[in-house]
Image (spheres, helix red, strand yellow):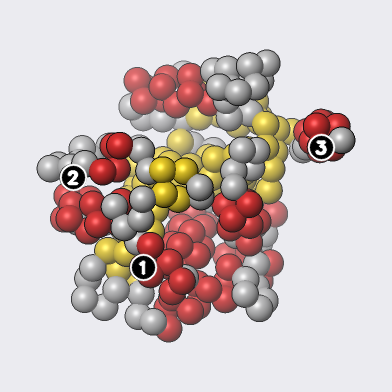
Amino acid sequence: MVRLSLLREVVRLPRLQITLHVLDRELGRRVYRHHTRRHPRYRLIGNKTLGVGLIQLAEFEGVEEYLGSINGKNSAAYYARKALRRGYRISIIDRNEYVDDIFQINTSIEARQGQKMASAYQERQSEYPVQEDYRYFGVLDETGRLHAYCWLLVAGEVATADTLLGHAETLNDGTMYLLMTRIVEWLYEQGTTDYLMYDTFYGASDGLVMFKRKLGFRPYRVSWRLAG
């Protein structure tokens, strides 16, 4: 019955075609291959094609209407305001100025969403490369300490939350909701992107699905194209 219910849901998913525009052509090819290669568990479908978590920015007149759609008690907007009241702010950062803070975030808990953190997160990076297709967002407290970050790949029609993590000790302050809602606001300000993507719904833990839905992400069936 569960499989039948899932099949019905997949059939009803709204369909989109999204074109990736990436300045670094090799990076663009890697992203395209990653999205369209066979799914590791469901071999008949593409890796990032079913249940893709997207916010369609055109559904709202602007950031205020978007925030209104995710407002209410214990909502994403509520927790974002909570983070602001506690003195957090968001900024585009230079990752190399926060190497130690990033490492502390990565190692602040051994497992997330029921999965042990990958070994790469257990290693302190001495230096991060600067990639022109990415914007690096961070949530800072009043002392300038980094508590959460998102590496956002801006690829033409779609911006993707490629890596998204927060320090385990301050997650309850609403830092992740502040981070994501401010990224949506930034995308509206730029006016060049149609969608914000955060991985897929299928295979995600219940907690992660709830996080996505609170922020207004919805599942879609996506066919990918790579520009030029």
Of residue 44 and residue 169, the one placed in the foreground of this image is 169
Residue 55 x/y as whole percent = 62, 50
Q: Which residue is mark 2?
A: 124
Q: Where's the N terminus, which quadrant?
A: top right
Q: Is residue 53 visible?
A: yes
Q: Which residue is mark 3?
A: 2
Question: What's the distance in space between the residues labelled 1 and 3, CA to CA?
Answer: 36 Å
Quarter-wise, where is residue 74 in the image?
bottom right
Going 50% across and 78% down the picture, which residue do you hit?
81
Going 35% across and 20% down the picture, which residue do you hit?
26
Question: What's the distance in space between the residues labelled 3 and 2, CA to CA?
Answer: 42 Å
Q: Identify the secondary structure beneath mark 2.
A: loop
Of residue 226 and residue 190, the one placed in the foreground of this image is 226
Q: Amino acid at mark 1?
A: Glu
Going 29% across and 52% down the picture, which residue do you hit?
107
**Disc number placed over residue 169 in the picture, else none:** 1
Q: Amino acid at mark 3?
A: Val
Residue 169 x/y as whole percent = 36, 68
Judge whether 169 appears above or below 192 on screen: below
Counting residues from the start of the chain, the first of labels 1 and 3 encountered is: 3
